[in-house]
Image (spheres, rainbow, N blue to C red):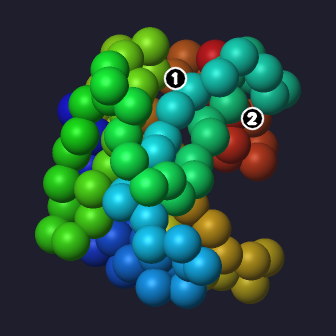
Amino acid sequence: MIRLTESAVDAVKTAMGKAADVPGGLRIQVETGGCAGYKYMMGLVRDPEPEDAVVNFKDVSVFIDSASQPLLAGTTIDFVVALEGSGFTFENPNAEQSCSCGKSFG
């Protein structure tokens, strides 16, 4: 399905530790929009939706809705720290094109 690097897992664990409500995991989905056609959406949530696939990485559960699963298949998610800033990156083999910000694809 997808893969989270160790850096991404650590970033999610840190965010979960700082959350006011205790999240059950990270929800990742794809929505129509962005400058290339689709955009990645991520957020901490308490529970998965009934149709979500649940993928576990160490102590982090990732929830992916059924519509996003084929668009995210084989994707590697990393967390990078650079001079320009830090954030999650997506290496998606299904993306025919992507924008320069790395947050949307087509």
The amino acid beneath tag 2 is Cys
Picture coordinates of residue 13, whole percent (x, y): 39, 78
* Camera-side residue of 36 and 45: 45
Picture coordinates of residue 44, whole percent (x, y): 52, 58
* Secondary-structure class at tag 2: loop
Q: Check the image and name the residue furthest to the front.
A: 21
The residue tagged 2 is: 99
* Camera-side residue of 40 and 54: 54
The residue lying at 57 percent from left, 48 percent from top is 42
The residue lying at 36 percent from left, 40 percent from top is 48
Q: Are marks 1 and 2 in contact (CB under 8 Å)?
A: no
Compared with 43, 34 (above or below) is: above
The residue lying at 41 percent from left, 25 percent from top is 65
Left or right for 47, reference 28 = left
Characterize the local packing of mark 2: few (<14), some (14-19) or many (20 or more) Cα atoms within 10 angstroms. some
State which quarter of the image contains the N terminus.
top left
The residue tagged 1 is: 95
Q: Check the image and name the residue furthest to the right.
A: 35
The alpha-carbon separation of the residues under discs 1 and 2 comes to 10 Å
* Secondary-structure class at tag 1: loop
Compared with 60, 51 (above or below) is: above
